[in-house]
């Protein structure tokens, strides 16, 4: 029995589950999640590496390659800046006379360099 009521799915399973199904044991099982989330152990969690910055992620550059500014756990690496535009992040290395801003969203020029 497919259940398409968001209220039932989110109440039984948690946030971000869009559709769910009752299995033969009458347990509600998540079938699909909001965009940017995947099903793990019957819960929708953010999907690091899908290219969309979701809750719990500082960045997401569509891959799980370290050293490009966005780490494999979707956190911003040291000496990089990752501005977000429409839920997408593009990281750049802070080089030369610049340093990483406190919010990690921009490279800031050094004064009197």
Image (cartoon, rainbow, N blue to C red):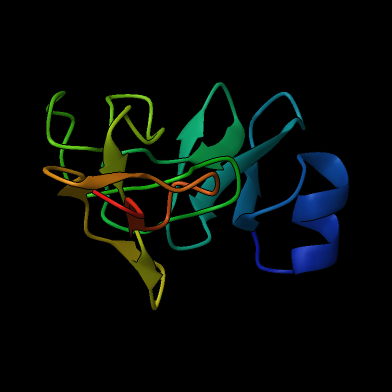
Residue at horizontal 75 percent and vertical 30 percent from the top? 27
Which is more toward the observer, 79 or 70? 79
Task: Decide if residue 1 is in sight here.
Answer: no
- The image shows residue 52, relative to residue 27, as above or below, that is below
- Image mark count: 0
Residue at horizontal 31 percent and vertical 29 percent from the top? 77
Q: Position of residue 66 (x, y in %)?
A: 16, 23
Which is more toward the observer, 53 or 100? 100
Q: Position of residue 105 (x, y in %)?
A: 42, 56
Which is more toward the observer, 104 or 46? 104
Q: Position of residue 106 (x, y in %)?
A: 36, 58
- The image shows residue 10, relative to residue 4, as above or below, that is above
- The image shows residue 29, relative to residue 17, as above or below, that is above
Q: Position of residue 46 (x, y in %)?
A: 50, 42
- The residue at the far bottom in this view is 86
Task: Decide if residue 100 is in sight here.
Answer: yes
**Relative to 85, is 63 on the left or the right?**
left
Residue at horizontal 56 percent and vertical 21 percent from the top? 41
Residue at horizontal 60 percent and vertical 29 percent from the top? 42
**Relative to 69, is 36 on the left or the right?**
right
């Amino acid at each position: 029995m497919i259940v398409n009521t968001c209220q039932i799915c989110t109440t039984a399973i948690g946030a971000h589950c869009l559709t769910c199904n009752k299995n033969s044991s009458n347990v509600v099982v998540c079938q699909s999640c909001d965009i940017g989330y995947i099903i793990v152990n019957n819960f929708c969690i953010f999907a690091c590496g899908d290219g969309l910055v979701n809750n719990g992620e500082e960045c997401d550059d569509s891959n799980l390659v370290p050293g490009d500014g966005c780490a494999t756990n979707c956190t911003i690496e040291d000496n990089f800046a990752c501005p977000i535009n429409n839920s997408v992040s593009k990281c750049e290395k802070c080089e030369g006379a610049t340093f990483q801003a406190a919010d990690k969203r921009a490279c800031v020029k050094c004064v009197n360099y």
